[in-house]
Image: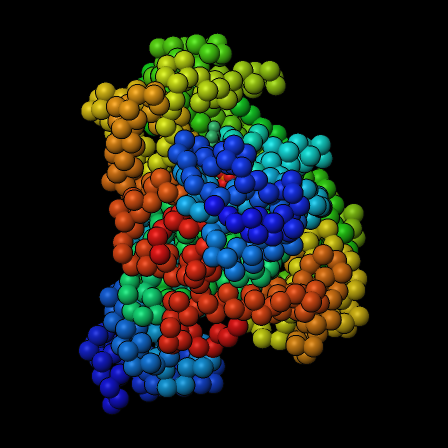
Amino acid sequence: MLSQSQVNKLKSILGDKDVITSKIGMYAYGYDGTMLEGAHVAVVFPESTQEVVEVVNFCREQGIALVPRGAGTNVSGGTLPSEGSIVINFARMNKVLEIDLENYVAIVEPGVVNWDIQEILAKYGYYYPPDPASWKASTIGGNLGESSGGPKCFKYGVTRDFIYGLEVVLPNGKVIWVGGRDFSSEPMYDLTRIIVGSEGTLGFITKAALRIQPVPQAKRTMLGIFNTPEDCSQAVADIVAAGIIPTTLEMMDNLIINTTEDYAHAGNPRDAGALIIIEVDGYAADLDAQVETIRKVCEKDNAKEFRIAKSAAEVDQIWLARRVAFGSVARVKPNYGINDITVPRSEFPKAIAGIEKVKKDFGATIGIVAHAGDGNLHPLILYDQRNKEEVDLLHKAEMVLCELALSLGGTVSGEHGIGILKKALMPKEFGEQTLNVFKKIKRAFDPQNKFNPGKIIDL
Amino acid sequence: MSDIVAKLKGIVGEEYVVTADMSQYLRGNEQPQAVVFPGSTEDVAGIVKAAYDAGIKVNVGGKVVDTKGLTGGIAIVMSRMNQIEEVDPENLTCWVQAGMNHQEFVEKILEKNLYFPPEPYAVSTSSIGGCFGIGDVDTKAFNYLPTRTYILAYESVLPTGEVYKIGTKCIKCVSGYDLIHFITGTRATLGILTRVLVKLLPKPQAYRAVVADMPSLGAAAQAFKAIQKRKIFPTRLNALCKALGNEIMETKGVLVLVDLEGFPASTAQNALEVEAELRIAGATFSKIVEDKAEYDELWAKWLKVREKINLQENKVKFTVGPAKVPNAIASLAGIVGNLEENPGVLVEGLNGKLTVFTENAENDAVAINKLAMSLGGNVCGLLGNKLKSKAYNEDHNEIINVLNSIRSQFDPKGIMAPGIKF
Ligand SMILES: Cc1cc2nc3c(=O)[nH]c(=O)nc-3n(C[C@H](O)[C@H](O)[C@H](O)COP(=O)(O)OP(=O)(O)OC[C@H]3O[C@@H](n4cnc5c(N)ncnc54)[C@H](O)[C@@H]3O)c2cc1C
């Protein structure tokens, strides 16, 4: 617990309303998508870089750890407060500071919600490609913390690829700008890239220069429905082999097709083994030919149905099932564990087969949603949090899934980050020397280990 | 023979250590005590460990090594490690040894209908290790993103001699700190890349180039803006002053080089629209290059000019953003004199970046940075950072502290890449 004088000092920096120390008030900031809980002693809401600096300086003097937080939607325990820490919540630093369309850059504060910047940009015919499914809630700061991906990242890349520069408050309280308003302004080392994805363990981001771009001239949305996930993954491989990098290749398996039908009547056949939403974008003149190539590929790979959206309404209809996929499983079980294992694209069929085996071995109910182009799978393990046996089974099954990904030359995390949930797997993914190198990075920025301690690695 | 030379010979074999007539492997005036040619990661690790133990400086290069600060040190030439180890078309990846020549790699990969977009820094000598070591934001970066985008995994020897490996064939990976991309551009200060897993793309299905002779850089810049207004984003959108342009083709004025890679229909259509905009902006000559051999020859010549620009010491590179290029051009002459007569001006329309040769680079950089900042940009890289910090009254020292702090974690004795000072 903080002493009264510590609380008073924080209030003098931030104002009364921006410091919470009551148990009930702090509750909502103590957990994240993992359902675990932390043990913090205060939540603070800075509204400017200067306030962040003062909080950081005060906490450093007092030896208190700080845990940065955006919307808290991460699913890796990245915002779980460590014992005795203060949560620094960036939600109130939510201004869009500048939009410079002609130079393809937007400057925003970290608390801006991804969707909000998209809405502003859409008015001008622009967008910011990283689009995690949580975009209606998740913040740019959190997206940066995890280097989040989204359905469009097969073609366009992840958060890391769209950041020109950052204003960062370092653990010593100093403020630096890394990068600039273009990709050529890094001070030799690409500090932007090491901070993006560092889960708040190296520095706190207080401003970000995002690369924005004009909405492509045209887009086409297609749906391929297959009897088996194997045929579906073959189609993914064949589309890429045909020289096309779609914007989106979103796959769903039979279980998810059925839960989404129950929930939203999306109009997909319940007996299908898998479906895939395919989107291509680019110059209008090219898209007919690409659609035709994709149609042929899907037919060759035994698609039982292939639809091409002809109107905005049909695009929405195709996307409906995917949009409600996560929520729809609540009809089967109240909770789901979401994983983000990722394998090389060629190993996708083996990953699917491996998940089937986990289903059998554990008697678990698992539905699969996947960014198939990236080899990034979201096996959703359905369970009931009130049932301890099911919770234990969930944890065991998740570890086996991670090991499966590693055995296929993949990674335990394609987009959700390590946090604390997957920290134990780090020695399985990386050799000792690589882990040592991670420690060098952490020590270089935060030798006292006070910025989000215990996340990613232990020092 | 010194102890270290004997040790090196023990590691790589006598024939792979050169101590006399080293100049063909070196760039610069200083003299290392040996040039050594490792054949494997183990060799590199052995060399670096020996150097580290003895506190001897080390630098590395593909074919040639920069000798700045390397007097009495060891120059490691990676050219023996020049193999493509594995091409994986299904995953669009390739394991390649760091000493492979960059351009040769591009060509070999193209034969397999695959594409590695980054442009070689210096086409005659650059290696894949150098490509990622320098980590350029090249003239194709608007569409293809910077060089770092194309590294998925690597093996590296730390300055202390240990080997580590990181990355997978997955294009998405957020496990651990993103050293995979961070390593790009660290110029061997944090270790020596020995093998790299690069990300590839499918080979473009169609190519066109548009060339034009423009009355001025300003006219070229206006055309560049108009092209972007049409939502056309070519692969390269470059303008060269007459002196550089004439190394590619004879022009009366500024040479504009536009590269269009992509799918057949849009590539053909965009070429027509680009040419039209260049004509509207005053081109006295323009041509769409459709013939593939002619196209290849054009860009091969461009790469030679690019090498010349990159190896020129007396130059300033700065960014202002694509929309501000005309303003930058209009004001630049006030600092460096008539641009049309300058021996080296390059305008990268989409990156919003300009490079200008100047005999007084240090001084001009200060004035150019002021100009660039007034347009929302800055001089590139470390120098730009320093100038920008000074102008804003920010603490540039803190950036330097961070850089040094990282470097000393990796290289406590400071043996690697001694020419690089922050
Ligand atoms: C239903 C659902 C769907 C999802 N879909 C996707 C998806 O498609 N793709 C994907 O990648 N993820 C997805 N996620 C995970 C999650 O939404 C993302 O990781 C998201 O980017 C987190 O944003 P946030 O604002 O909630 O950040 P938080 O969860 O609050 O924080 C995330 C990390 O960033 C750090 N952080 C926050 N702010 C700052 C700052 N200012 N400076 C430094 N560090 C900071 C935190 O400490 C933490 O480590 C999904 C989650 C859910 C629940």
The colour style of the image is: rainbow
Depth order, front residue of A455/B80: A455
Residue shown at 43% from the left, 41% from the top:
A39
Residue B259 x/y as whole percent: 59, 50
Residue shown at 54% from the left, 69% from the top:
B400
- Residue A36 seen in the current view: yes
- Residue B345 seen in the current view: no
Residue at the far front: name it. Answer: A4
Residue B311 falls in which quadrant of the image? bottom right
Depth order, front residue of B42/B281: B42
Residue A151 x/y as whole percent: 49, 32
Residue at the far bottom: name it. Answer: B1
Residue shown at 69% from the left, 67% from the top:
B393
Residue A186 x/y as whole percent: 56, 60
Depth order, front residue of B148/B215: B148
Compared across the picture, whether B369 is left or right of A378 comes to right
Residue B232 x/y as whole percent: 65, 41
Compared across the picture, whether B316 is left or right of A195 comes to right
Is A452 placed above or below A179 here?
above
Quarter of the image for the C terminus of chain A: give it. bottom left
Compared across the picture, whether B70 is left or right of A212 comes to left
